[in-house]
Image: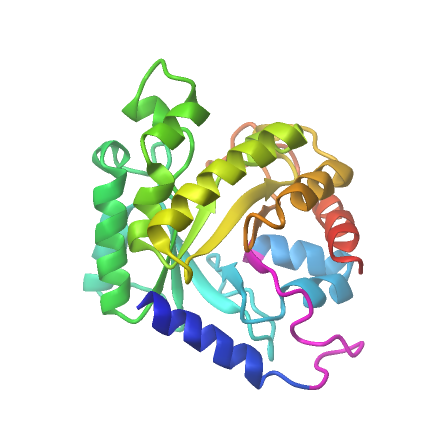
Amino acid sequence: MRKRFAAVLVLLAASITGWSGAGGVRASTTGIHWIVAASALKEIAQLNPTVAQAAFDNPSTYVVRDGTGTGIRSGWTSIPTASYKSYAQLSYDMSHGLFPAGVQAVLYDDERWSFTPTVEQLNPALYIGLAGQLCHSHGLALIATPAVDLAAVLSPGTPRYQAYLSLGLPAAAAKSADAVDVQAQSLETNTSAYSAFVMKAAQQARQTGGANLVVLAGLSTGPAGQTVTATQLTSAANATSSLVDGYWLNVPGQSAYCPTCGAPKPGVAVAFLRAFLHL
């Protein structure tokens, strides 16, 4: 499935020629894979539609839908993606006709929180594998994003970044997924720590997943409510762009998923994208 999905992306990219959209922005300009939430895309596009299209209007961008729909603008070639925090919920939706129509990829976001069942937190490799089997049987790509905080469940008392690597979570994700995200965003204000961790996690994932695996790293305009600047995001991305295929760009706001977050900061995301992509 991974080879077939990669081939589909290549064909989609090759089919895009000329110019598209208002302002004459070429549909695929960056060669970078992205994950972005529909809500974040909307906020970024409201501030700077040219930057939003240049970055995300391409078949290498996974747009994670929200309750109102895919969030992908008419004519864009981004990949409609559904996010699930629980394999059990994914399986239920699949078997009961509740899975959203038109979705091409699933993001399985297992973390140490109430939205992922405890049994899934304790057995991430098993449930990533089950998610991969289920998605692939329905012709869907799987993006596996096991959070670093799962280390606190699996190896209490061990430094979580060390445990994440020693437990082999990147390898477990890569074994069954088409794309893997390393949720390193909590380190992004320390470029050296961020790049060192991403390097080790990406190497582990690629050793298992092979050449067709897409590896991304997490970036956020405010992880868990931290204050982050566009300069810090740009530094983190520049330091790791040769190590990964792209980034999961989060623009979080306060919600049940992030109770310590403040208001969303799409302006930081726009400034980062302009600097990193030279737009």
At horizontal 66% and vertical 41% (from top left) the residue drawn is 239
Q: Nearer the viewer, residue 166 or 25?
A: 166
Q: Is residue 35 left or right of residue 265?
A: left
Q: Is residue 109 left or right of residue 199?
A: left
x and y percentages locating residue 267 in the rendered image: 76, 47
Above or below 175: residue 222? above
Q: Is residue 150 left or right of residue 266?
A: left
x and y percentages locating residue 71 in the rendered image: 55, 64
Residue 64 seen: yes
Residue 255 seen: no
Does 25 lie within the magenta span?
Answer: yes
Extreme top residue here?
157
Residue range (magenta): 18-38
Q: Quadrant of the C terminus?
A: bottom right
Q: Quadrant of residue 44?
A: bottom right
x and y percentages locating residue 103 in the rendered image: 40, 68
Q: Quadrant of the N terminus?
A: bottom left
Above or below 245: residue 75? below
At horizontal 35% and vertical 22% (from top left) the residue drawn is 152
At horizontal 69% and vertical 29% (from top left) the residue drawn is 227
x and y percentages locating residue 165 in the rendered image: 39, 31
Q: Nearer the viewer, residue 88 or 130?
A: 130
Above or below 214: residue 218? above
Most common secondary structure along the magenta stretch: loop
Q: How is the image coloured?
A: rainbow
At horizontal 29% and vertical 54% (from top left) the residue drawn is 176
